[in-house]
Image (spheres, coloured by chain):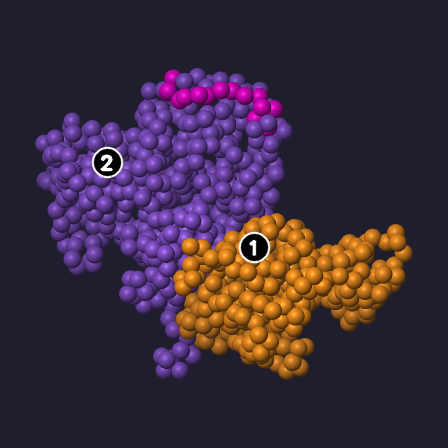
Chain colours: A orange, B purple
Amino acid sequence: MMTDIRIDVAVIGAGPAGVAAGIGAREAGAEHVVVFERDWDLGGILQQCIHPGFGLHTFKEELTGPEYMHRWIERAHGAGVTFRTNTMVFRMEEDGSFWTMNPDEGIQHVHAGAVVLGMGCRERPLGAIRVPGSRPAGIYTAGTAQRFVNMEGYMPGNRVVVLGSGDIGLIMARRMMWEGASVEGVFEIMSWPGGLRRNIAQCLDDYDIPFHLDHTVTQVHGKDRLEGVTVAKVDANKKPILGTERFVACDTLLLAVGLIPENELSRMAGVQIHPVTGGPVVNQCLQTTRENVFAAGNVVIVYDLVDWVSAEGYKAGKNAALFALDGLPKATRRFDVRGGENVRLFSPQWLSDQEDATIFLRVTKPIEQRCRVTADHGLFSKTLRYARPGEMNEVHIKAEQLRMLPPDVREIIVDVEEE
Amino acid sequence: MGAVEVIQRLFDVIIIGAGIVGAALARELSAYAMRVAVLDKAAEIPSGASRANSAMIHAGYDDKPRTQKARFCPSGNRRFHELQGSLDFTLRECGSYVCAFEEDEIRHLDVLLDQGRRNGVPGMEIISGDTLRDREPHASREIRAALWAPSGAIVNNFEAVVAFMDNAQQNGVELFLETQATGLLCSEEKQEVFGVETTKGRFLAPVVINAAGVHAGEISRMAGEESVRIRPTRGEYFITDKTVGHLVKGFFFACPSTKGKGITVASTAEHNLLIGPTSTPQTDLEDTSTTMKGLEEVLDGARKLVPDIPPGAAITSFAGVRANTLSGDFNIAVLRKPRGFVNVAGIKSPGFTSAPAIALHVVEMLREELSDRVIMTPNPRFVPERTHIPRFAELSMEEREALVRRDPRFAQIVCRCETVTEAQVVEAIRRGARTVAAVKIWTRAGAGRCQGGFCGPRVADILARELGIPLEEVTRHGGHSRLLVGRTKEYWFRGNE
């Protein structure tokens, strides 16, 4: 028969957010904390990120993805977190309970005092960006190619074009070159890179891989295997400019055209999803619109650095445990966060007056000069040397500041402007 | 079945083409004690127009009375409804609306209504724009009237083709994939046919049926019959995410024009929105590329009917090439010369709908006109039912539990978007899937919003394991469509550990 399982805190996903959430929940006093992971191993996508560059903020040193996760997983084992791997959560109910499945235990119904969603995000496929043409073999998201190369030891192709300049695309351009493939270029439809500047320098510039801003792929060619792509320059409205098309021969097209928070389960639970971030609407406690469901990491908003994902995961786990133990302070006042003109997305979407808050935000357009990130009512102001869409900015507000705001203040606007 | 083994094989009937026509015909012929071979040049079925179309089971009001289309479409529609249960494919009764915006279009609805009644289409009526919007709140405010046909339905066209063929194979029909017909074997001066020359060797039979879709013209010419002139027409489509699949319940058509039935909007059997097609004549029989212009036309046309369709909701696009003919009607005939050769050609819209009725008709033609070449005695082992691979995603928790206990591989999710399990993928391979595309056709693994980003490598692993081939030999859709080109440097450096 189907078994019912009762635990204090359940975490869905054992990537950087989920592992830290498990630790946070245990350290806040929850007894029985279980992290459910559909993969055989822990670590999420960082398992295949074998390049260095992780953990500069958390550990003050540069680690590879597996090294970074190894440290967190060790800590989780030490803290008494239970992991259930090869276990898929395939359905969630509105009361926050959910159904898991694995070949050993069959189907189980899990009831937890609180749940932390840590499912991460997935890559946007070709169809979603409407590139016309045929559908031959040889078109992969950068992450799929990374899995083939780094985890399984296979080459997806020999002659590569990368569409989009998200970080995984940049990392994979270099990785394919190291493996002996020729990389014909990285094409980005925007006028600025999607990923971190340091990855442009270390992955493209250092290897003379051509980088074309304001360019896109307008057609895919080839019946069985990819034979090439047509690329073109785009105008200010991102429409291809007639006469700038050229054919680039390649057998592989890697896509790094955006990441989408993965929220099927959140939707089943009836959690409100924000139309812009694509993730659950949360407050600074990472509590969703269902009070027993918390969420952290790329399932909420796509972060630039894993350090923030781990930190937010820990916070979500801690607050989930407090909720399960009836110790999470209830908001007495509520402030909605709004983004100013140059703010593309941000999280959390609302603040309670009971806890210090960090608001993460991304700008719409780059500002390549001194600028200022602010929260109104004089809550926060910080000067930046620049602000770029590929890199997140933070706003820090103390609970005490929130409590001192005049009673008619119900909204806080965050913005980034030139000085 | 390796190429070397099939040097010369003897059958009673050879069908060229395993689209819906070939599959439905194979299934009907499997009720008789005869050896039937179905040849298809693709590595998975369906691969041609039966794979890429509107998935509509038309009611049958579009076609002028006394045409073959008018004859077979309504009866094909009935046959689909009859066989849905016993062949276990997904058919969703949704009804269809032809939407009129202008005065002359409203008048045209009357013409269609009259045509439909004469063709024997049940239950049709013309409703006002407001009545339409009461039933379908997202229909455009500009729609002034609509023709409602309750027998219009949407089918999972992948499942329907494999269901007919699967049942045919259970009853003894043999399917040969990646087997392209290169010539007909005929007696002198093409008096009679006795087989097909293929890329995999010779197949001999006294009856050869041409159900080759867009390639029917070439096959017919091999028989010396020039009357089949295919005018390939490309139709481009979008599939949207399931989050907008609720926008319509029925199948929406714009008022038909000379170019065809126009852009349609429908919620698929799995609740994605399917929008399209364009209708672009082309010379190439195989080119199923989509174009920027075509996809814009599709989106504009669809938003005219249902303005709430968000432009960004597409998860994939595709195109199909239809076997249009100059006459505009089906071309179904037993040729006098070469004796034994049958054309089932020009089966374009409503060809998918008509196919099961055409199949019954062709069986009758064989019985009446080719009794000297083929003997039609009942197949004593004929089983008219088959079941599909369990659709795990659609089952209740109790049914899932039962499956998991029967086979723990049902607890191993391969495709998370569509909740497809390893057991389903393994069963698809057992029933003949050899490519990543075939597994998608059988199970929907890779048909969801991430379009195989997650499950692609896993499906490839299972194919390699089950077929006992190296991972590098797994293809997307046969031929040269290998997914991988070899091992990494690092793999060789570490000594294949």
Question: In the figure, residue B327 lies in which quadrant?
Answer: top left
Left or right, B337 with reference to B482: left
Q: Residues within 10 Å of mark 2 (few under 14, many from 20)?
A: some
Residue at the image position 37 percent from the left and 44 percent from the top: B158
Q: Chain of mark 1?
A: A
Residue at the image position 48 percent from the left and 47 percent from the top: B317
Amino acid, disc 1: Ser
Residue at the image position 30 percent from the left and 33 percent from the top: B356
Magenta stretch contains residue B131: yes
- Between B338 and B252, the residue placed more toward the observer is B252
**Which element type, helix, strand or loop, lies under badge 2?**
helix
**Which element type, helix, strand or loop, lies under badge 1?**
loop
- Between B201 and A48, the residue placed more toward the observer is A48
- Between B199 and B51, the residue placed more toward the observer is B51
- Where's residue B107, x and y in %? 52, 18
Amino acid, disc 2: Glu
Q: Which residues are magenta?
A: B118-133
Q: Which residue is mark 1?
A: A97
